[in-house]
Amino acid sequence: MKILVLGGTRFFGTHLVKGLIKEGHDIIVATRGNQDFSFKDQVRFEKADRTKLEDLQRLATLGPFDLIYDQVCMSAQAAHIACEAFKGKCKRYIFTSTGSVYNPANGVELFENLFDQKKYTINLEDTNPYDYQEAKRQAEAVFSQTASFEVVMVRFPIVLGQDDYTARLKFHVDAVLNQTPIFFPSLETKMGFIQSHEAGEFLKFIGEHTFTGAVNAVSSGYISLGELMNMIETLAGKKAVYANEASDVNHSPFGFDKDFMMPNEKGLSLGFNFDLLKGYLPELIKFYI
């Protein structure tokens, strides 16, 4: 296939591109060029600003594309110009979305239908650039309601991995190792995660599938934050120190006050084999230790 990847030069995007390379596809990777990447000699690289219509129109002239992966769309406007630029130039479009489109609630599993992107009101006016939830909701709405090509919206939870530049799991391991106080709104909160290589594999898988619409991509099983901290304590040989009040430096980056449980039944039904969360977490924690 002829494939365009917008972004894809770090974290799970690199796993996606490396997987596509192994399959022998004709790949163009387009980014602003700010991030170096190891597979530059194995793909065609185009420097482009994802937020500029003229840049996307230039990329469209390199098509038509069987498949476009969009790793970096962050607004209704960005989705809109993609729909305009790639009209008639794309068969299938995979948008990397997020579980943040949902409203978490304790005891409630966040199935795909709990956010209906096909009925969500589109606002092409400028929105708060720091409102990640609304940005992704708007992008999903624009793609699903206005695109002339097939669209898949892959909703990821927090992504973990040895290559995680956000170091969110590492934050918790370091806190235990260094006996640094850490604050959680609730240790009873249950969460789901996915590994970076698993996320890349799912993106490649869904690009080869006929499915359209929204799908959760999450490792199998949930874990409470208390269980996670107990796991870190056992492997580190130290007890966590908990803070009674939150601050900018001690608040857990996993510190949600509501369960964040995204079931993966739809992805499983499509034939993808998700890894078991509690099966790989100990090894990842050991890596950070």
Image (cartoon, rainbow, N blue to C red):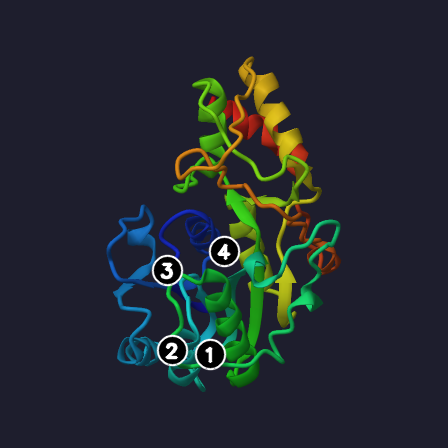
- Mark 2 closeness class: few <14, some 14–19, many ≥20 residues within 10 Å: some
Dot 4: element: loop
Dot 1: element: strand
State the CA–CA distance, disc 2 to disc 3: 17 Å
Dot 2: element: loop
Q: Nearer the viewer, mark 3 or mark 4?
A: 3
Q: Along the polypeptide, which appears first: circle 4 or circle 2? A: 4
Q: Along the polypeptide, which appears first: circle 2 or circle 3? A: 3
Question: Cβ–Cβ below 8 Å for labels 1 and 2?
Answer: yes
State the CA–CA distance, disc 4 to disc 1: 20 Å
Q: Which mark is residue 234?
A: none
The residue pinned by badge 1 equals 90
* In-front residue for pair 95/41: 95
Task: Kindly identify the residue that appears in the image at 45 percent across and 32 percent down.
Answer: 171
State the CA–CA distance, disc 4 to disc 2: 19 Å
Q: Amino acid at mark 3?
A: Gly
| Residue 228 screen position, x and y as percent | 62, 31
Left or right of residue 52: residue 134: right
Q: Along the polypeptide, which appears first: circle 3 or circle 4? A: 3
- Mark 4 closeness class: few <14, some 14–19, many ≥20 residues within 10 Å: few
The residue pinned by badge 2 equals 63
Q: Nearer the viewer, mark 2 or mark 3?
A: 3
State the CA–CA distance, disc 3 to disc 4: 19 Å
State the CA–CA distance, disc 1 to disc 2: 8 Å
Question: Cβ–Cβ below 8 Å for labels 3 and 4?
Answer: no
Q: Amino acid at mark 1?
A: Cys
Q: Which mark is residue 23?
A: 4
| Residue 31 screen position, x and y as percent | 30, 62
Q: Amino acid at mark 2?
A: Gly
Q: Kindly indicate the quadrant of the structure image that contains residue 120.
A: bottom right
Q: Nearer the viewer, mark 1 or mark 2?
A: 1
Asked if residue 141 is positioned above or below residue 110 in the image, the reply reads below
